[in-house]
Image: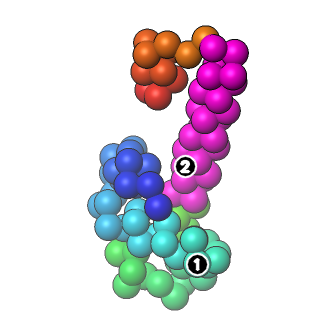
Amino acid sequence: MNEAHILKIAGELHVQTRQVAATAKLFAEGATVPFIARYRKEATGSLDEVAITSIRERLLNLAELDQRREAIVKSLVERNLLTDELKRQVAT
């Protein structure tokens, strides 16, 4: 679980970080949106299906962005084009 992603999502959705972290953990364990919304209210602080779905989508989006960043950095390294400035820009 990426702590930076959890903080970012909590800020974007105006929910507590513990709610996002608990939801992310449940997704990592294989739980579905309906299951979390119905049976894990105590863990998520009573988030509804819309909020849980939003958290899931943002977690996936941010993970995809991380993978893309890694691919870009790897490509730049292979071509000996990576500078500190480029690395900083890709990381943001």
- The magenta stretch is 55-80
Q: In the picture provided, is 59 more to the left or to the right than 76? A: left
Q: Residue at x 63, y 41 (%)?
A: 67
Q: Residue at x 43, y 49 (%)?
A: 5
Residue underneath mark 2: 58
* Neighbour tally class for label 1: few under 14, some 14-19, many 20 plus, Cα within 10 Å: few
Residue 89: x and y in percent read 46, 18
Q: Main secondary structure of the magenta part?
A: helix
The mark total stands at: 2
N-terminal label among 1 and 2: 1
Q: Residue at x 64, y 77 (%)?
A: 30
Q: Is residue 50 something that shows in the picture? A: no
Q: Amino acid at mark 1?
A: Glu
Q: Nearest the camera: 25 or 41?
A: 25
Q: Is residue 36 magenta?
A: no
**Mark 1: secondary structure:** loop
**Residue 89 against residue 21 in the figure, above or below:** above
Residue underneath mark 1: 29
Q: Is residue 72 magenta?
A: yes
**Residue 76 against residue 60 in the figure, above or below:** above
